[in-house]
Image (cartoon, rainbow, N blue to C red):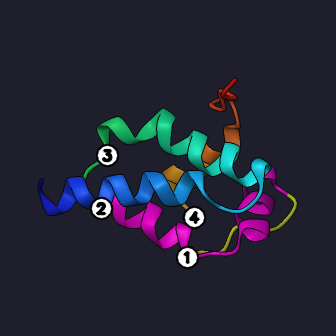
Amino acid sequence: MSDFTTRLARAKFRGWHRGTREADYMIGGFFDRYSDGWGEEDLAWFEMLLDEDDVDIMAWALGTLPIPEHVAGSQMELMRKLDYVDIPR
């Protein structure tokens, strides 16, 4: 397994195991929806995002807090759309 593949698997796990169901759906759902075409830069952004607090990530995505420069960009704009969450049954 390549280093990139290992990092991707770890990021998926971290995205889906945030501690609250809402954060799991938002962050893990984002990963599931968009990660297939990711390269190094996209994965590095997501790994950096995973180090942030869930309440901040959710507030940025929902537009209730301004998005800081270090997470702003096309990936965060995709997250702000919130049209990607498939709730597991």
Position of 3 relative to 25 (above/below)? below
* Residue depicted at 81% across the width and 61% down the height: 59
Numbered disc 2: secondary structure: helix
Q: Percent position (x, y) of residue 37?
A: 30, 38
**Mark 4 / mark 2, whichever is N-terminal:** 2
Residue named by callout 2? 7
Q: Is residue 4 above or below residue 34?
A: below
Q: Residues within 10 Å of mark 3 (few under 14, many from 20)?
A: few
Instruction: Tell me the distance, in whole angstroms, between the alpha carbons under discs 1 and 3.
Output: 18 Å
* Alpha carbon separation for disc pair 1 and 2: 14 Å
Residue 7: which quarter of the image? bottom left
Whole-number angstrom distance, CA of label 4 to CA of label 3 = 17 Å
Rendered residue at 62%/31% (across/down): 84
Bounds of the magenta segment: 40-63
Residue identifier under label 1? 51
Residue 47 lies, in percent from the top left, at: 44, 67
Residue carrying label 3: 38
